[in-house]
Image: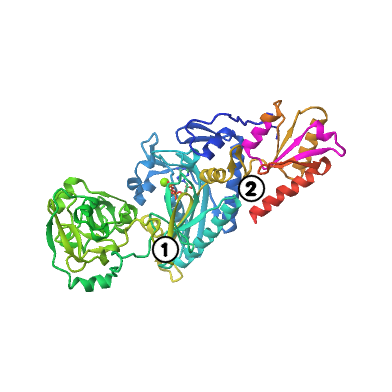
Amino acid sequence: MKLSQTFIPTLREVPGDALIASHRLMFRSGMLRKLSNGLFAYLPLGLRSFRKVERIIREEMNAIGSLEIKPTVVVPGDLWKESGRWETMGEALLRVKNRLGTDFVVSPTAEEAFTALVRDELSSYRQLPLTLYQINTKYRDEIRPRYGVMRGREFVMKDAYSFHTGEDSLDETYQAMGRAYRRIFKRCGLTVIPVRADSGAMGGSGSEEFMVESGIGDNTLLLCRACDYAANVEKAACKPDWAGGEGETLSPEAARAAAASTAAVEKIDTPEVKTIEELCGFLKTGAKRFIKTLIYRAVNGELDLSSAPGNYRGEKRPSGEPGYGAAFFAVLIRGDLEVNEIKLAAALKASEVALAADSDVVRLTGAPVGFAGPVGLEGIPVIADPSVTALNDVVTGALAKDLHYTHVAYGRDFVPWLVTDIRTVKAGDRCPLCGGELYEKKGNELGHIFKLGYKYTRSMGVSYLDEAGKTRIPAMGCYGIGLDRTLASVIEEHHDEAGIIWPMTVAPYQVILIPIKYEGAVKIAADGLVSALEDRGVEVLLDDRNERPGVKFNDADLMGIPYRVVLGDKNLNLSPPMAEVKHRRDKENRLVELTRAAEELTGLVYGELGELNR
Ligand code: ATP
Ligand code: MG
């Protein structure tokens, strides 16, 4: 391809809103332009790389027997009403009406569409397992699209959905997907951190996210220095570090034993002392000697509250399903720790949790904010982090303004309704698998594999007949990869000051040929080399522009094409005639005999492809 005949509008300036390398370089190299906030157009150069990512993903999906289909992007709103996500998805879901007033959504993901398609065709266990996928446009009305295509509003996702007669079959496909994902990212030249959703200690894993390290990553990851444990902070667990200083570290059992000889609970005056820090100063002890009590409001929960204290049920769900529409919980954690609201929401099976309004705190605890505590608290369920179960002789709020309790013992003075891990794990905490030290990294999610179980097949009424002729509901898995984000992440990992440095597998062209002046003998040599390379299946961009060599070199560096070949009178007049060859990574040129250049470059290109695709 001749550069003059394509459309690669390179830029010298950096777009003002481009905060990260991939965003800057995709614009400057002429790969991408912006149509509107979160809406981008790939120009010819960008589309070539995009298609290569797409091809790698397609090959790996096909290799594991996943079948490609092409559903529509606009899907009936009724399907989303069936699954319940018409209500729960929130503002990210773009809802549109057609001229008849019928509701539609622009797919942000496609569990509903695939489940509906399979529902209509599935009758027998013989049709299972079945894995279908698409590589298709998605729309999410992200509040803050940013970092270019890393978080756009319209983007392309590969999303696969699998259907099974049981958990074993689901696990098999899930594992195959995990292996395919590792291959996809390796082939793209990406270093990913696979992050399991659970600690791995509880046996099987139901979800795995594929992260790349990134300074602007939206995810905080906890990794172990000693083993391969890696978890998202939203799920991370740690080994218990029971409270207490030197020599007074208690296990829950020891704490319970010690409680027998602990002094009775006593009320103490704590005028104007509300925060843990103020309390520490006032009582001159560390934060580990306190129980923090927070009142949370959770919405849209599936947790069964029928055994909650005082017949507490929360508000009903509008749909009338079991669970609660909104409910309050008192949440306890050791004073030095933080509650992780995502873990809390998961424990309460709620779609969201938030700290209760001040007026609700007053109503539920009988005291202003800052004086809640579990002793004598009635009327709402108490949820405790395991850290609390090892506390004996500690301080809590006393459910009255300016008062706290001291000598409080877990188990003796209060018993929570539920004990469950809700703490935010931090760097320095201990690995749940091996006890090694955890450290933090920021990460960006490129892909996700997830055992959905029966969520959609049940709510949307999918069934089949098993061998015995009995009606059953299939288990389901879903598996997504963002193509745009993957492509941008390749640039994040492979660039320098001057521009992109493409891995061969996703490079828009494999060789760029720069004639110093595209005329005369140089032109003849250049045209000859281009056809020799193209005959061998190498993708070449010929910079035939009438520009200064410096301009051409800069653009070549910016575009990041792996091999650059320069042809000029000086080297062509040598005997034998020579071409200058340089890898984008290298500083120095080498001279290669012109007659052997095509052969040699082809070997280099295929060598690198082979290495990545291995
Ligand atoms: P995030 O937490 O980054 O919003 P998500 O959990 O919403 O991601 P999924 O619903 O699992 O993402 O979607 C699968 C993949 O689609 C993601 O791993 C990511 O690569 C891609 N993706 C999701 N949202 C966007 C977006 N706004 N722009 C570009 N890619 C996206
Ligand atoms: Mg999202």
Q: Is residue 300 left or right of residue 74?
A: left
Q: CA distance from mark 1 to mark 2?
A: 37 Å
Q: What residue range appears in magenta? A: 552-580
- Give the secondary structure at mark 2: helix
Residue type at the position of mark 1: Cys
- Above or below, comparing residue 418 to residue 561 in the picture: below
Q: Is residue 276 left or right of residue 400?
A: right
Is residue 569 magenta-colored? Answer: yes
* Residue under pointer 1: 431
Q: Residues within 10 Å of mark 2 (few under 14, many from 20)?
A: many
Q: Is residue 397 visible?
A: yes
* Residue under pointer 2: 505
Q: Nearer the viewer, mark 1 or mark 2?
A: 1
> Percent x, y for residue 450?
45, 57
Describe the colour scheme in one phrase. Answer: rainbow
Q: Is residue 159 visible?
A: no
> Percent x, y for residue 288?
27, 60
Q: Is residue 177 left or right of residue 563?
A: left
Residue plotted at (37% across, 47% down): 80
- Quadrant for the N terminus, please: top right
Nearer to us in this view, 345 or 21: 21
Q: Residues within 10 Å of mark 1 (few under 14, many from 20)?
A: many
Image quadrant where residue 438 sits: bottom left
